[in-house]
Each structure stands twice: as structure tokens, then as C-alpha cells.
């Protein structure tokens, strides 16, 4: 579906302006019509804010879950990997090392999970009114920024406790935040469209996230892997994101391989483009199937 630019009409009294939007088939199957998202930016903002409020509406602890979850994960991983398994942490205090990885990982994994369920979870909107359906996975992905911001404050407190000050590399942090969003959206758009027709996707994604976690250097440094496997391992885009998070925030960590990050970014952009095209082809049947 695509829309043309709104035309301004006037009522019979000549005072109240009316908006007319023509809805029709896209001119090309590869037409993304991303301008529709900007035209409906107020709806995008509303859906993001609604997701944030609904997430903690009936929770006694409220938004504090955004802090408790990574803190509890950090304590468990510190006990298992640092105290028991004696996994090194590149000269960084292990709680800061693992929390930095968790900050990036939880941002990605929660965005991917919400993005997958975005269309099915809003079936009442899909079947009643028209709006660019792509707004649903985009808003579900962006709503995690609030949780990320809250958890990031705790990281700053931990770094201050251990006397760690970020250097000029911290200016690269927004780049890796954007890369985490693109990764979640690239995979999530595919999953959101498939989840409408095949509800098994809703069960597959949590399993995929769990396996993906252990294939990402959240609780261990990438230097622990044999050299011959690192190139294939680094094809996982979240490897570059997690390593980039640590490098931009903690000066003692090693510099990530930007060549691999660049290659994975190109693959992600291609996957995102293909996902949007597939999503727009499938959205014609959303109202009938969902």
C-alpha cells in the first residue's frame, strides 16, 4: 500500500479544513515509501510512548525492572564465569565488562522480541484503520531506548565506582547503538511478517535469542576463541556491537575490527531493505490473517 500527498479540502461552511489521502497500490514492488512513516510520525511517537507505559503499567516495581534485570544477570554471570570458570576480562573489572555487554545485548534482544510480536499484538489496529504497517515494528524497536537509557545510568555509576573514565572513543557510542537498532530491525521485520501467518515464529524467536546470546561475547572476551574461528565468529553482527560498546566506554578493552563491522553493516542494510520489501508485500493480507 502507498499513499499520495494529502490534499486539503474545505467543508461546506468553508472554515474547517479536511484532509484527503488517496490509498493505492505501490508503483513498484521495490518501492519502500519510507516517507509515509514521516507523514505518520505523530502516530509513531504515540505507539512508542504507549509501549513504554503499558510495559510497566501493572508492575509493582515499575521501570526499575530496566535496572534489576541487567543487574541480576550481571551478578549471575560474574559468579559463574568470573568466580567459578575464571574467565578473563581484558584487564577490566569483570562486573563492568559483563554489564557493558549486557547493556548492548539486552537492548538488541528486547527490541527483537517486541518487534516480532508487534503486528500480532496490535491486531485490533490492523483490522480497523489504515496507517503504514511498518510503523508497528519500528515503534516496537524504538521503545527500548527508554530502558537502555535507565540501564546506562547504572553503568556510569559502576564505572565511577571502579574509577573508569571513558575517553574520546565514547563519541562512537551512538554509532553502535544505531547498529544494534538496525540489527534488531533487520531481523525483526522478517519475523514480524512471518509471525502473522506462522505463529510458530513466536516460539522460535526466544530460542533463537538464547542461542544467539552464547554466540556473542557478552560474558567472555573474543580473545578466548581460537584465531582460526574468529573471522567466522565475527560475522555475527552483534559481536561487533558488543565489542564496540566496550571499546567506546572502557579504555582498557581492545579495539574492534572495523573491517568486519563494516562488512556486517553492509549485510544488515541489504537484509533490512529485503525485509521491508517482504513486509510490504505481506501487509496486504495482514487484516485477513491476523
Image (cartoon, rainbow, N blue to C red):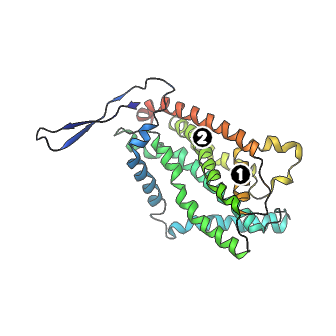
Q: Label 2: state its secondary structure.
A: helix
Image label count:
2
Mark sitting on residue 186: 2
Q: Position of residue 175 (x, y in %)?
A: 63, 51
Q: Residue at x 70, y 76 (%)?
A: 161
Q: How many other residues sit within 10 Å of disc 2, few (<14), some (14-19) or many (≥20)?
A: many
Q: Where is residue 25 in the image (x, y as percent from the top left)?
A: 40, 25
Classify residue 176 as left or right of residue 89: left
Q: Earlier in the sequence, mark 2 or mark 1?
A: 2
Please state, as top left, top right, bottom left or bottom right, where the C terminus lies in the image.
Answer: top left
Q: Where is residue 29 in the image (x, y as percent from the top left)?
A: 49, 24
Q: Which residue is drawn at 79% across and 65% down?
A: 80
133 in relation to 73, above or below: above
Looking at the image, the residue that sits furthest to the bottom is 161
CA distance for labels 2 and 1: 17 Å
Classify residue 234 as left or right of residue 55: right
**Depth check, front residue: 137 or 62:** 137
**Depth check, front residue: 275 or 159:** 159
102 in relation to 79, above or below: above
In which image quadrant can residue 133 be found? top left
Name the residue that disc number 1 marks: 213
Q: Is residue 198 visible?
A: no
Amino acid at each position: 500500500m502507498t499513499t499520495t500527498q494529502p490534499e486539503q479540502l474545505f467543508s461546506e461552511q468553508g472554515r474547517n479544513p479536511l484532509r484527503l489521502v488517496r490509498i493505492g497500490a505501490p508503483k513498484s514492488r521495490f518501492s519502500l515509501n519510507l516517507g509515509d512513516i514521516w507523514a505518520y510520525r505523530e502516530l509513531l511517537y504515540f505507539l512508542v510512548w504507549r509501549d513504554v507505559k503499558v510495559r510497566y503499567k501493572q508492575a509493582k516495581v515499575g521501570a526499575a525492572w530496566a535496572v534489576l534485570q541487567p543487574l541480576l544477570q550481571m551478578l549471575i554471570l560474574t559468579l559463574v564465569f568470573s568466580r567459578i570458570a575464571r574467565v578473563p576480562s581484558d584487564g577490566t573489572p569483570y562486573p563492568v565488562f559483563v554489564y557493558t555487554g549486557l547493556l548492548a545485548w539486552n537492548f538488541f534482544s528486547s527490541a527483537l522480541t517486541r518487534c516480532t510480536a508487534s503486528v500480532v499484538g496490535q491486531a485490533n489496529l490492523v483490522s480497523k484503520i489504515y496507517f503504514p504497517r511498518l510503523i508497528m515494528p519500528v515503534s516496537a524497536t524504538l521503545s527500548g531506548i527508554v530502558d537502555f537509557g535507565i540501564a546506562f545510568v547504572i553503568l556510569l555509576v559502576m564505572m565511577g565506582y571502579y574509577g573508569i573514565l571513558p575517553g574520546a572513543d565514547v563519541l562512537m557510542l551512538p554509532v553502535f547503538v544505531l547498529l544494534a537498532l538496525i540489527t534488531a530491525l533487520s531481523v525483526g521485520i522478517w519475523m514480524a511478517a512471518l509471525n502473522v501467518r506462522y505463529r510458530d515464529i513466536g516460539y522460535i524467536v526466544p530460542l533463537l535469542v538464547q542461542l544467539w546470546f552464547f554466540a556473542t561475547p557478552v560474558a567472555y572476551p573474543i580473545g578466548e576463541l581460537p584465531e582460526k574461528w574468529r573471522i567466522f565468529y565475527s560475522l555475527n553482527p552483534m559481536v561487533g556491537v558488543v565489542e564496540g560498546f566496550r571499546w567506546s566506554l572502557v579504555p582498557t578493552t581492545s579495539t574492534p575490527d572495523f573491517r568486519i563491522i563494516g562488512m556486517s553493516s553492509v549485510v544488515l542494510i541489504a537484509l533490512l531493505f529485503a525485509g521491508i520489501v517482504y513486509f510490504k508485500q505481506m501487509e496486504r493480507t495482514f487484516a485477513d490473517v491476523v
